[in-house]
Every structure is written in C-alpha cells, then in structure tokens.
Image (spheres, grey):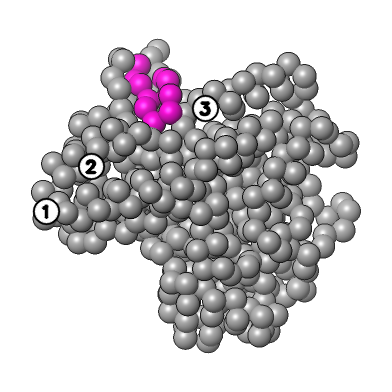
Amino acid sequence: MNSVEQHINFELNTYPRRDLTIVKGRNAKVWSDTGEEYIDCVAGIGVANIGHCNPKVVEAIKQQADKIITCPNIYYNDTRGNAFERLFDIAPDGITKAFFTNSGTEAMEAAMKFARFVTGRNNFVAMMKGFHGRSMGALSATFKADYKQGFGDLIPGVTHVPYNKIEKLRGAVTEETAAVIIEPVQGEGGINIADTEYLKEVRKICNETGALLIADEIQTGFCRTGKMFAIEHSGVKPDMMTVAKAIAGGYPVGAVLCSDKIEIPVGKHGTTFGGNPLGSAAVEATIDFIKENKLWKEAEEKGKYFLEKLENAELTKARQIRVLGLMIGIECKEKVKPFIEQLMEEKILALPAGPTVIRMLPPLTISYEELDIVIEKLIKVLS
Ligand code: PLP
C-alpha cells in the first residue's frame, strides 16, 4: 500500500484531504514523495515559525533523546527547568507561573479549568468566529456550530459575542463570568485583528466584574504577528495566556502561562507527557533561535513588504488584505477553495480561514526571494 492508500484505508476520515504526500521539509520548503518542491505558507498550520527541521531544534532533540525522553512531573528535570526559564525570559510582564501541556487544546482546557477553580464562577464569554480547539471545554468556547453539532451537551455557561464590539461584551460579562476568552488575532475565524482600544476595554470590563482574561495565543504567539505575543501590540496584560503550535519548532508542546492570580493546589491538575524532556529541549532551542534571530523583526518587516507588494497589485478577486506580521488573510469576493487548489498547482501551499479567506502563515524565516514567488503566484491567481 502507498501512503495515500494507508491513510484512506486506516485513518478515521475527519480531515478534508489534499492530494499531496509531504515527505520532507527544510525551512520554508517542503517536498512531496514524487520530489515536487513547494513553498509552505501553511507551515504545519502556524507551527514552523522557525522553519521546518530547524537545525538547532533537530540537534537539541537528538541530544536529548540520547539522555532521557520521558520524566514524570513528580520529579524535577534539568531540561524542563531550562524550558521554563526560556519561556519566562520572553513571557510578558505579569506572567509568573506556567503549566506545560501537549497541545493548544489541552492548554485551553486547563486554562478554563483554572479560571473556574480560581474564581469559583461557572461562566465564560468567548467570541463569535473564535477557535480554541475541539475537546469538550475548548469546543464549548469555539464558535462554529458545525464543529459542535452531534456531540451532545457541551459545558454550560458559555456565551459568544461579536468580536471587536465592546458594548456587546459589556452586556455579556457579569459577576458570574469566570473568564473572557479571546484570540488577539482570530486565526481560523478569518485573520480578524482586535483593535487596541477594544482589548483595553476588554481588560477594563474584566477588572470591573472580577472575570479573568484568557488570551489564546496558540496561533499568534512566538512572533507570528511581529511581536513575541500578539497581545503585546495593545499593551494589555492577560491573566492567562495559552500557547502551543510554534513553541517547540514542530514538536508538540503547549502551555498555560499564568499571572499570580492563578493558584492551583497540588493534585488538582496534571499530565503524563506535558513538560517531557524531549519537548522541553525543543522549547529551549526554539526560544533561543527566536531571540538570536530577532524573529519578531523578521515577521514585522516581511509582513510590511508582503502587504505593500499586494496592495500595489490589481487583485480583482480580493476584497480586503489583513496582515499583522506574517499572519496574512486575504478576504476574497468568492469562495477560496479553487484559489487554494490553483496555488497548490503553482507549488504554493496555503490554507482557508472560513469560506472566503486565504490564510498564509509562512515560516518567519522565509527568504525574500521565496516571498516574491508567493506574491507573484498570488497575483496570478487573484487577478
Ligand atoms: N486555539 C487556536 C487559536 C488555534 O488556532 C488552535 C489550533 O488551530 C487551537 C486553539 C487548538 O490547538 P491544537 O490544535 O494544538 O490543539
């Protein structure tokens, strides 16, 4: 059986598949089993910010694999300790503790549990078009009805309000609200960027009502938007931040970053694999690479370059281009599935974000030559 047959025969059919078998990646490029080369603006869905198979991460994983791969959280571990220290070196002011998980969804699930525990309140206010994962808690905060339909009762007490509309939020957050959950830039929802004034007001409403503020930085974190974390564009300080995706160069790691409002007693939460030494080594190497290469600057400058070139082009099929760093959304006048297929024929990998938005999340280490090719092909497909 070839790879396609193996997947079709054995994998539960939950993914909308593309006709491509990826077998190798280096920086912003991936290769198929037939040797075709693609520029990868999917990057593991916003994971490979430091490029595929970043040599620093590859080396760190190899070395760690030779030392110890697993070590439960009841024991201290040197590499895990280093990963915590690296994370706190880059975390915004006000973050004082962290809990490691294996994915973004698990980080959201933990953050929602922590919010309920700390406040003694039950309810959450999340955003329309928001995406936070698909476990029962995270799915309750996720907006899209189709993702929830058929799965029975989710957790009670979750309300969704329109993004960037402060009056709607004011009406929804009460003294029963454990937390407001928000992506500073909505990823899956269409690359929608929160206004700075809005985020400041969100913080104010949380302060007034005693609700916690959870910033979901799972897609926006680690320089994607031109700052280490997207919330930093506004200066707002969340009570918890969930991170994952780009934190470990492609190795599955997530974390909840907590302010000193969050205290959870021993035994109240846990994980077997979260904080494992292999993932921790990858976190350490990834954060070192990000800092050494000032990746926030790369994202900011390349994003501006990209936007300027596209704004100067006659993209007749595009309605609006939304860019923050290298988090790119091109809102089109029609459904984007055919455009994404055409881009793939042109050897560019891109994603949808809803039916009418093309989403591009290239590695922040992509070269200007590669960006120029992406821009040229986008112009070809959208003109
Ligand atoms: N939150 C956001 C903003 C995301 O983009 C995602 C994944 O796309 C998640 C949560 C869920 O993360 P994971 O797929 O790692 O469980």
Q: Is residue 234 left or right of residue 282?
A: left
At a point 18% along the width and 39% down the height, the residue shown is 376
Residue 33 falls in which quadrant of the image? top left
Q: Which residue is mark 2?
A: 375
Magenta span covers which residues?
23-33
Q: Identify the residue at horizontal 34%, vertical 20% (top origin).
A: 32
Crowd rating for badge 1 (residues with CA inside 10 Å; few <14, some 14–19, many 20+): few
In what element is the residue under mark 2?
helix
Q: Position of residue 117 (x, y in %)?
A: 77, 66
Which residue is drawn at the image coordinates 77% and 68% (left, top)? 261
Magenta: main secondary structure equals strand
Please say whether residue 149 is visible from this viewpoint. no
Residue behind mark 3 = 54
Which quadrant of the figure contains the N terminus? top left
Q: Secondary structure at mark 3?
A: loop
Instruction: Work out how far the residue at label 2 is from the one at label 1, CA to CA, in angstroms.
Output: 12 Å
Q: Secondary structure at mark 1?
A: loop
Q: Which residue is mark 1?
A: 314
In this rendering, position of residue 146 left or right of residue 37 = right
